[in-house]
Amino acid sequence: MYQQTLIFKKSLFLYLYFLIVFISFLLGFLVNEDSSGGGLVDFEHEWTSIQEFKLGINSALTSMKYESSRTPLFLILNYFNPFNNTDYGFRLSNFIFNAFIPISFFYLIKKKYSNLSFNLIISVTLLLYLSPYFRTSSYWAHQENLPVFFTICSFLYLHLYESNKIKRNVINLFGIAIVSSLAFYSDQKYIFASLICFIRLIILYKNNYKNILLICIFFFISSLPTLYLFYLWKGILPIQSQFRIGFYPKNISLGLSIISFYFLPLFLILKNKFYEILKSINKIDIVFLIFLTFVVIFSLPNFENPWGGGAIYKIFYLLNSFINNEMITKLIFMTFILFSTFFVYFLLKQNFLNFFPLLIIIILSTFVEMTYQEYFDPIIIVLIFSYFKFNNKYVDIFSKKIVFNYSLFFIFFLIFANIYYNQFNLVN
């Protein structure tokens, strides 16, 4: 009887937690929440772009009023949006769509890890509703969540194919190529979704040359619109955004700091195993650490303004404002980056494909003036709980303790993000 009562109380708590999180997500739209600091500002650019696309897709692709640096699938889909006549209708319709994206994430985890309890899966799914960046993009009709949705769909499709839960036929092989390419057509950085699917399929059929040829053909066909876009733009970005292209090495260390931010809950849990981790370091790990040190030194940012850079950068910006000594700030920042990045590397090094999406996002972000946390959020959440293969000796990502820590982490992250932007009135 006691055990049944305990189970009932736990279930009741979960339902109340779900209700509170989801209601807060709905209320955020009603009160025009801006948890990432760029909601209204970026919406004005999105609204300008959608007005141009409403005049015609072909002409809009090369228009100087196409005020986005991303590939145009979001704007093309919203061309057919029957509610795009008013800015509120445009925002509301996109908000409703975004509200369902975590459901696809839930379904991916459920299919991939069938032995997990419903409580654990729903708790992980709620992390998206708590993400300041997922929320802001949902409320203000930003483009960031659409490639996340197609990445989730492509990972799900690939898993069902690899596990023989759907037929391994030509139609589904071509379907994976198309769905994974939609992530790229929503945002260039998400080319990793297609590359991962391509590599995994090649590995699956490593001894079947006929299927390997078909895979290459199908992924080439799915890339043809890319070639057309780049031909129209005479580059990899829309014409209006090409002035942003350059080389900005500071985005490497900033990107590493943003990635490390999402591993902080694991860092706190594994702090008692640091000595064990240090004992297991080998020569390759040491070489990586030396290489990482040179990269971080080369790419250290200045802490002159609060623009972009992610949550860790903003903490160090405030620290630098307090101590008023940038050399000390840089030294502490460098130490944090080296320690935290090596920790992430150690947890992920068991599978080289773990690094694929992270490297691609970091490398591509070096070509824009400033990297933002929204480039990594919420996709890092998705990768942590549905893609990365961790060292099982140290991490069971779906343990109750880890999921609880992540839930607590994102609750505080959301609260402090709102405090930060409301109190300091700083841009993202």
Image: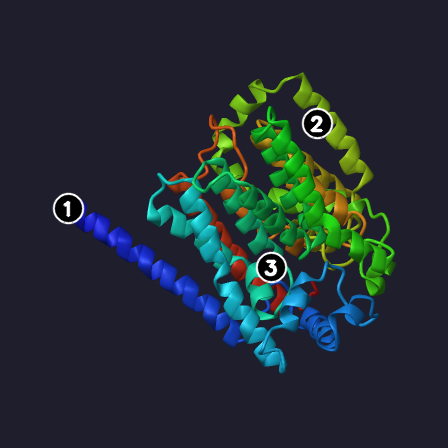
Taking depth in this image into account, of 210 and 234 the one nearest to the observer is 210
**Residue at label 1?**
2
Could you tell me how far apart the alpha carbons at marks 3 and 1 are, in whole angstroms? 46 Å
For badge 1, the amino acid type reads Tyr
Residue appearing at x 62%, y 55% in the figure: 147
Instruction: Specify the quadrant of the image occupied by residue 116.
Output: top left
The answer to whether residue 411 of the structure is visible from this angle is no
Does residue 119 sit above or below 423 in this rendering? above
Q: Which residue is mark 3?
A: 146
Sequence-wise first label, 2 or 1? 1
- Residue 180 placed where, x, y %? 61, 48
Q: Is 294 or 168 nearer to us in this picture? A: 168
- Residue kind at label 2, given as amino acid type: Leu
Judging depth in this view, the residue of 207 and 302 nearest the camera is 207
Looking at the picture, which amino acid does disc 3 mark?
Leu
Relative to 250, is 13 on the left or the right? left
Residue 322 place in picture, x, y as percent: 70, 54
Task: Examine the image and state in which quarter residue 19 appears.
Answer: bottom left
Q: Secondary structure at mark 2?
A: helix
Looking at the image, tell me whether mark 3 or mark 1 is earlier in sequence order: 1
Q: Which residue is mark 2?
A: 289
x, y percentage for residue 10?
27, 51
Secondary structure category for the residue under label 1:
helix
Label of residue 236 in the image? none
Residue depth check, mark 3 versus mark 2: number of the one nearer the observer: 3
Is the residue marked by circle 1 packed among few (<14), some (14-19), or many (20+) residues within 10 Å? few
**60 or 138: nearer the viewer:** 60
Relative to 392, residue 37 above or below: below
Measured Cα–Cα span from mark 2 to mark 1: 52 Å
